[in-house]
Image: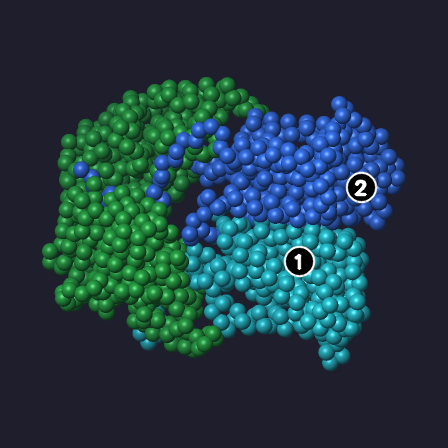
Chain colours: A blue, B green, C cyan
Amino acid sequence: MTSPAEADTEVVPPARRPRPRRGVSLRDAGPPIALVVLFGVFAALSPGFRTVSNVQNVLDAAAVLAVVACGISFVLMTGSIDLSAPGIMGASAITVALLVANNRNDNDLGLVGIVVAVGLAAALGCLSGLALVLLKVPSFMATLGVSAVGLGVATLLFAGVQPNVTDPLLEGWAVERFAGLAHLTWIALACVLVAWAVQRYTRLGRYAFAIGGAEEVLALSGVRVAPYKVAVFTLAGAFYGLAGVMVTSQLGAGLVQAGKGYDFAAITAAVVGGTLLTGGRGGILHSTVGVLLVTVLTNGLVQVGVSPYWQGGVQGLIVVAAVAAAVIPQRRRNQVTK
Amino acid sequence: MTTNLQTEPVPPAPAAPPALEVRGLVKHYPGVKALDGVDLVVRQNEVLGLAGENGAGKSTLLKALVGLVRPDAGEIWVRGERVRLRSVVDAANHGIGMVFQEQSLVPNLTAAENIVLGSEGPGVRTGIYRWSTMRRLAQEQLDKIGSHIDPLARTDSLSFADRQMVEIAKVLRIEERTSHPPVIILDEPTSVLESQEIETLFTQVRRLREFASVVFVSHRLDEVLDVCDRVAVLRGGRSVGEVSADAEPADLHRMMIGSTGSDDHYHEGVAVRSDEPRRPRLEVRGLCGPSFRDVDLDVHAGEIVGIVGVHGSGREDLCRALFGAEPTTAGEVVLDGARLDLSGTRAACAAGIGYVPAERKTEGMVGPMSVADNMTLTKQAARCTGPIVRPGKQATLVDTWIERLRIRTPHRGTAIQRLSGGNQQKVVLARWLVAGDVRLLLLDHPTRGLDIGARSEVYRLMRELAATGVATVLLADSLEEAIGMSDRIVVMSDGRATAQIAAPAGAKPTPLDLVKEMV
Amino acid sequence: MSTPVLAQPAPDTPVVARPTVGRRLTSFMPLIALVVLLAALTVVDPGFFTLSSLTAAVRTAAPLVVLAAGATVVVLCGGIDLSIAALCSLATVLFALWLPDLGAVTLAAVVAATALIGLLQGVAHVLLRIPSFIVTLGGMSIYAAIALVVSDAGPIPLSDRDATHWLTLYLAGVLPMAFVVALLVVGVVSLVLGLTPLGSWVRAIGYSESAARLAGSPVDLVKVGAFTLSGACAGLAAVMLVSRNFSGSPTMADNLLLPAVAAIVVGGTAITGGHGSVWRSLAGALVVTLLRVGLPIVGVPSAYEQILYGAIIVAAVALTLDRSKLLVIK
């Protein structure tokens, strides 16, 4: 017998039994397959694309974006968004250019200069996180603000005269090669490995993942979420800072605009790699595949003769398409989209 | 009002203090007194059932016990010691843990991580995960309840029953925080389990009793009596007594609903209708949607049809689908002879259908907007001349309806969120009435969260509207409400309309008649 | 019932949502800020409060006012339009390119084109259910790419400066025509929102989209309309920029995104939607402009401008946002 009171409906929607997932989902397998297919298509279309030197080019070109993507992946994992890469990269690019041997002042801090620049970037990232958890400003607004602050700091330090880097270490990163790839590419690879280890083996990484999955459950389990959110933005800031240093190394000079467009390119890479903007899905390896996809696409289009100016436009299209593809299966009639 | 006290004689004072004791717990919510002096004793190593109708205060009491709700008055004692519980962690430190009704696991973490979440101990050193230690810690917990789940499986790849095991394993971690046997609260653990899984769960509960006290909450009274040593009953935020495990479900049910004269406040028989056969106002034929199939339903003008069904019967989705707020996959709906366009809410509004959502605060009203703007949100033409809003016209219209429905508001310009729940609901209802063209009203739990007086006014309004010829579909808050208000009751089960029961004034079915059809 | 009765007392106590201190302050914030800024600048530099410098200030502000006004309606609906600046840049290029062929109707053509682009964005947002910031962020890079391609990445001089000459005139000798047009836009949008059901719909959608939809409001149409208006305003702002620079360029308006967002939030429009208005953004845009022209006057290097934008955006959003709506802030 059942009680009449059972007729009461609960506030929670009827829980549907989830089907256990088996094997590798299309979302996980799709991006690598797409990468291989895309590579094959361009290799078939363009003789210039399939040369060894071009493949080296693609990998070298992916280096900076890969580092930015490492940072942004942690933020996206938590379900937040980060638009602060251009500002933070600009600030760190100018800072490092002024701290290592350069034509503007007598500083010659070398590696210490790089560490300071990355530290400054981490501090800026920390600001975003604090604005999010203390002031409750939504992340896209907080990071837009912090990006402006970073650009302002960069403009202040720039002071109208471009600092050209003469530091051999930093210059060497971009020029010297090991096993056919520039040092920068190896640095990026190291970053990916470190980020992957953080994601897999640290509480910070796992909690970032969990925050995107079910933030309220963490709170119910007695976990204070706020410090982890701040830490995630700080870590992301540090990655952007290193990316800014890498751009400075590539250009041989510190530019305010060092990070222009990297925020969007990194979001594109992450989304294309299978990270959900709602958080809790994807990760560093997904984003890295996404970075290669975006870079191969960019390089391939140029190789087959498309104007490089279209680069951003293509990214814009694929990010909208990728988000739409991820959202459509979950659409509901009365869904609220902001 | 008779209170059917069937209290067992209190056993001779036990040597050990009770594992958990609640004295005179009070909690107010705006408009509702959720707890009105609850007393509860959980003895050591017993399974205590907790029963009560919706709104009896069960969930508020449970939340107070795990520190999610701070009571306004009253005391909580753990093993003879008064405690203040400020958070889940606080409660855990005192050895109280709860398995939540909506499972509180992080879906994208492994089972092991969920089990140790928040108290990883040696599983994490200086922020670095020791996966092997984690796995061992989790395995220890799973072993306690004899579960064979792989601790490193992703939680969302587990079955519902397995996830529940993970939750129990997680809750048992509080043993490490206290030297005493813990108190484990299970909130509606069986609501979505199949019978075999329920058996497994009951075995677990009996096993838990060996080293813990258990509070077991369920709507299924037979289960409660089956697994519990005794059952405490809440009604209207008060403890009204308890029954022993050998009691009959019917006795328990009688104690839960009390024997208040439930008929008087439903204003039965106010509506006058002719019984001559005519075409129904609403004809639903073979309608299929996300959680319902092949539903046929007729509603005549002036008739109130109640739809009842257990959790997951699909009645809410059906109601929303009729309003164009949920997609339909097959079937057709005819309103007054014209085929209804179910593609969206606008078409439904234009056809003269009104909908009062269950979630008043988030879906029914726009809180910061004024009473007047909320009332005229749908029927904009009623306050406009051409495309231009005429404030004077709106004021006259709104004031008329404030008076007719006796809405208590300082002014028509007051933000609706400052009104009491009952008055908010009247404004939401008035939204469909201002243009005078409503033909069908879909009321989804229209009295949820309202006190008796406000409920009574909503019932009066429903009767008056029915008397003017409005057809009404009612998803009631309780079976009594459905019986009291409806002229006819449709029972839904598993997404299908399985039975129709006439409920004319003077010949009402009893709740048990309906329940027979519902299972 | 002759006199309204107060809401009945307990146990049915209403939830009294009194305006927070922040909300009270912010309801007048743009005007207070405007007056304080003017006063401060006048104290520092008595020469500032003159007709000519004020005229110059409002003339500079005109494109910003128009950009912010359009995007405000999107924000009121609870969304955001991050593409306005890129779309505006694209529109300057289109104007310069189309002028030789289209002549007098170029303005209408450019505004129609940007309105259409805005409409497409709105449709993508509403139909594909993609968050507005992603759609418009994607739009931003698409428009920037198109602008680069069609302009070949360089400025395009105006073939006929007379075409935009009227915008550089002064009404009654003191009011710049561009600012008059901006005021007209603000006025018309405010009037339409105030006098028609659109105002109710926009606010209802912004405060609670699901409640608005279940009340039968045309949620999708209104949102698409808001994006269309935002696009059209970007086009109009582009013409104002062209009239000042005598050329179109693919990056001309890119640095207006932050000031425009700052104008909206400084005006007190909540980023969470519902609360706010278009005239507030007018005041906000004037505040932002005064800050920009005022910084050098008080001796602060203009490099601080960006930092200031960042800080006031975060501060203003924090002050105005509706916390009750955001249980989990992402």
Q: Nearer the viewer, mark 2 or mark 1?
A: 1
Classed neighbour count for the residue bearing mark 1: other residues with Cα under 10 Å, few (<14), some (14–19), many (≥20): many
> Where is residue B259 shown, x and y percent of the image?
15, 49
Residue drawn at (54%, 32%) of the image: A29
Q: How many marks?
A: 2
| Residue A201 occupies quadrant | top right
Residue C43 numbered tag: none
Q: Chain of mark 1?
A: C
| Residue B433 occupies quadrant | bottom left
Q: Quadrant of the N terminus of chain C?
A: bottom left
Residue bearing the label numbered 1: C87
* Residue situated in front as seen by the camera: B160 or C238: C238
Q: Chain of mark 2?
A: A
> Where is residue A330 shown, x and y percent of the image?
45, 44
Q: Secondary structure at mark 2?
A: loop
Q: Quadrant of the C terminus of chain C?
A: top right
Residue B108 visible: yes
> Is residue A247 toward the left or the right of residue B96 in the image?
right
Q: Secondary structure at mark 1?
A: helix
> Where is residue A131 shown, x and y percent of the image?
60, 46
> Where is residue A225 shown, x and y percent of the image?
52, 38
Q: Residue furthest bottom?
A: C172
Classed neighbour count for the residue bearing mark 2: other residues with Cα under 10 Å, few (<14), some (14–19), many (≥20): many
* Residue situated in front as seen by the camera: B21 or A275: A275
Residue A254 numbered tag: 2
* Residue situated in front as seen by the camera: A221 or A195: A195
Q: Is residue B52 above or below residue C74?
A: above
Residue drawn at (85%, 32%) of the image: A167
